[in-house]
């Protein structure tokens, strides 16, 4: 050798140490990404016809759920930073849940929907808000659609902690 120090990647050193029982393999941290959202149609329903309101509410909810359900949620979740090679698989994404509830505002009777997308994962993810908004506007065919997103990260997964640990808020 020429006297210069040989470089050994840290990853190899850690793998060797784990193999020899000197240290334990670092645990993956389960992350909780929770996206709260409100979608306001800005369409007043000034009617006392509860059947009409019910139909509008059910259709609105069905469209939102259709865009977010099953395999479709994967279109809006992007793997970023050091996790770009990750993909939608149980080794990276444990679970994704969607909860929605539509209602009419008490004063102006505007149809809107509150929702929560909860994703438990071992990765670095980002939700593509712009794409989701674009698809919602296409499906609903409404001008003036207002969407408010609020992203919370929570390692315990408790709703009480979401309020205290707000990391990101965005309005479109």
Image (cartoon, rainbow, N blue to C red):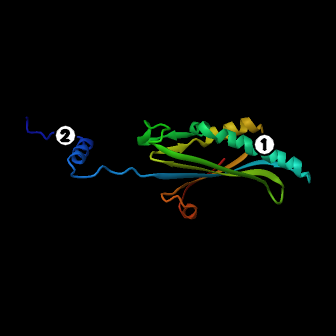
Residue 127: x, y in percent?
Answer: 56, 43
Q: Residues within 10 Å of mark 2 (few under 14, many from 20)?
A: few
Instruction: Give the mark nearest the N terminus, 2 or 1.
Output: 2
Residue pointed to by mark 1: 59
How many marks are shown on the rendered structure?
2
Q: Are marks 2 and 1 in contact (CB under 8 Å)?
A: no
- Residue at 73% x, 36% y is 139
Q: Nearer the viewer, residue 46 or 68?
A: 68
Q: Is residue 144 visible?
A: no
- Residue at 32% x, 51% y is 26
The circle drawn on residue 7 is: 2
Residue 134: x, y in percent?
Answer: 67, 37
Residue 143: x, y in percent?
Answer: 77, 40
Please give left or right for residue 133 compared with residue 8 in the image.
right
- Residue at 69% x, 39% y is 66
How far separated are the C-alphas under marks 2 and 1? Answer: 62 Å
Residue 87: x, y in percent?
Answer: 47, 37
Above or below residue 139? Residue 170 is below
């Amino acid at each position: 050798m020429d006297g210069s120090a040989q470089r050994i990647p840290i990853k190899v050193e850690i793998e060797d140490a784990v193999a020899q029982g000197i240290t334990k393999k670092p645990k993956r941290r389960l992350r909780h990404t929770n996206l709260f959202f409100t979608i306001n149609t800005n369409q007043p329903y000034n009617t006392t016809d509860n059947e009409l309101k019910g139909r509008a509410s059910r259709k609105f909810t069905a469209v939102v759920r259709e865009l977010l359900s099953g395999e479709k949620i994967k279109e809006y979740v992007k793997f970023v930073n050091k996790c770009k090679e990750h993909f939608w698989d149980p080794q990276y994404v444990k679970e994704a849940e969607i909860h929605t509830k539509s209602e009419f505002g008490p004063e102006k009777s505007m149809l809107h929907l509150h929702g929560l997308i909860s994703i438990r994962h071992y990765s670095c993810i980002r939700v593509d808000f712009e794409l989701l908004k674009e698809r919602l506007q296409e499906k609903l065919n409404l001008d003036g659609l207002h969407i408010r997103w609020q992203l919370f990260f929570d390692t315990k997964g408790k709703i009480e902690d979401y309020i205290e640990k707000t990391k990101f808020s965005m309005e479109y």
